[in-house]
Structure formats: structure tokens, C-alpha cells
Amino acid sequence: MAPQVAIVTGAASGIGLAVAEHLVQKGWNVAITDVNEKAGELLAGKLGKQSIFVRCDVTSYEQQSKVFEKTWKKWGRLDLVHANAGIADRVDFYAPQDEIADCAPPKPDSLVVDIDLYGAIWSSYLSLHYFRKENSSNRKKLIITASSAGIYPLGEAILYTAAKHGAVGLTRALGRRIKSEKLPITVNCLCPGMVPTNIISSDMVKAFPKEMITEMSVIIEAVDMVLGDDLLNGAAIECNGEQIQVRDQAPFLNDAAKFTGGGGYTDVIDMDDFVKHSEMKGKMM
């Protein structure tokens, strides 16, 4: 049987690196992607013939497309995509600007949203395309690295929180659609707490009590949980300290909330008409 194939974004360091190494140890072939070309090439060299490195800025749909194309061309299948690339806030969104100036302040740096949310969106979209290409009953897996900030808002990392809440919403919405159409695909997201990676300063890591740190072994355990469970779909999986737990969405307020938020409306309206209406309104803007 041919080895399974994965794409891992942001794989030159941190969670992505650990996942890539773990998959290769399990016998997988892995396409490693990262903007850090030197570190990516070094990792691919270390992992050997079971891996390739493709430099990729995940904010670019075109660059991500090339990763998927090269992976498919090399191995002819795709079983797992781990949309993992991420950064933290690069500005304090809340900090006051020059209030004396007569003009509006300059646009804030929003790269964290481009990488952490849009990068995951492009990975998800391309994953669906390539998962559908293979005529196989084997369950395909999409894992998105969100954050516990996608569950608990961080006032000190506002844009990061917004992006990670978006990643959780993407997972839940996509998972619900996949389940409704009974596709052999699952999508789940990981919501880690404080994991010692290079997006966090060493001083910050040292300041945390040891029991408040989430070790990489816990993340790998959560990944294996997803790989081993074909029924888990649309789940936000919190990984904090030594614990792993699926976090359910908020309960519906009432029947009206369940009807709109739970998809009951699909029984009374044609969703194709809904999409066409949205397209028409978009053209008018």
C-alpha cells in the first residue's frame, strides 16, 4: 500500500515541524512549506526522501496552489493537510495613535489576519479540491491550527484573537457542510494554549509556570486523535496544559436561533438562489 501524503504549512519550526517529523516517523510522505527557505530545506534534508520542501507564503493563493500542484504531481494523492502557518500580532491594535494629527492614522499592520485566517482559508479551499480528485473511500483530513484565543479572547492580542476565532468558525461551518453532504472528509482545528514556539519570546515562556505550558507532545497526541477518528468533524479541540478536550459550540438561545444558526432554513429556501442573490448584490457594489 502506498504511503499516505500530507502537506504541512509553517513546517520549518514549532508545531508544523513537530507534526512533519511525527508523520514521517509514521511512514507518511510530507510536503513541507514555509517562508523560511533555509530552515525548510534543512528539515527536508533531515527527513530524507519521504519529504519535499516548497517555499510558500500562505497569504498568496497562487503560491499555495503551487504547493498542492507539486505535491499531487510527485505522489498522486493527498490524505492530510495541516494548515498550521501562523504569527502573532505585530502591533498593539488598541494603542492610541497621534490624536493631535488632523488626518486619520495609517492603516494598522494586519499581517496576522492574512496569515492566520486567510492562509487557512486558502489551504482549506485547495484541500477540498484535491481531496475530491481522488476516487477513494479513504477518509481525508484537514487540520487547522487555531488557538485557545479562538475560544477565550485575548485583549492583548486583538487581531490574533479575531483571526483565531475566524479559524474556529471556518472549521465548524465547513465541518457541518461536509457532514451534511456525507463526504469522506473531516475538518477539525486545534486550539492550543501556551506552546513554546518561536512566535513567543523566551522571556514570556520563562515567565509561565511550568504547569501552564502545553508541551508539544500534547499537540501530537491531539493530531493522532484526529487521524484515528473518522467521525470527529467540525470540532474545535482545545489543548491546554496536559488536557485535550473537544469544545462544543455555544448552545442555541431558542428555536429561532436554532433555525437560523442550525441550518433549519435550508428546508425552506433554495441555497442556490441565496448564492445568486449574494453574487448580484456584490456586482452592484
Image: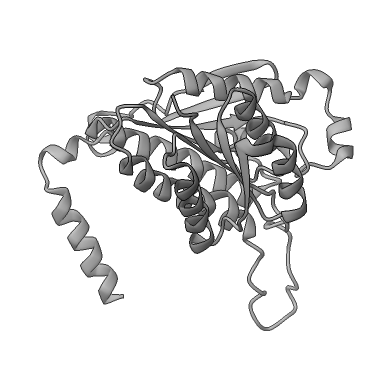
Instruction: Tell me where residue 15 appears, x and y as whole percent.
Output: 67, 35
Instruction: Tell me where residue 54 appears, x and y as whole percent.
Output: 61, 53
Quarter of the figure with residue 223: top right
- Tell me the residue at 63%/16% (across/down): 243
Above or below — where is 190 with respect to 243? below
Query: What count of labels does the image hold?
Result: 0
- Tell me the residue at 29%/69% (across/down): 282
Q: Quadrant of the N terminus?
A: top left
Q: Does residue 273 appear to the left or right of 149 in the view shown?
A: left
Above or below — where is 11 with respect to 217? below
Quarter of the figure with residue 14: top right
Instruction: Tell me where residue 169 appears, x and y as whole percent.
Output: 44, 40
- Tell me the residue at 26%/74% (across/down): 283
Quarter of the figure with residue 149: top right
- Tell me the residue at 72%/80% (across/down): 101
**Which of 26/217 is in front?**
26
Q: How is the image coloured?
A: one colour
Instruction: Tell me where residue 58 appears, x and y as whole percent.
Output: 57, 55
Q: Quadrant of the C terminus?
A: bottom left
Q: Residue furthest bottom?
A: 102
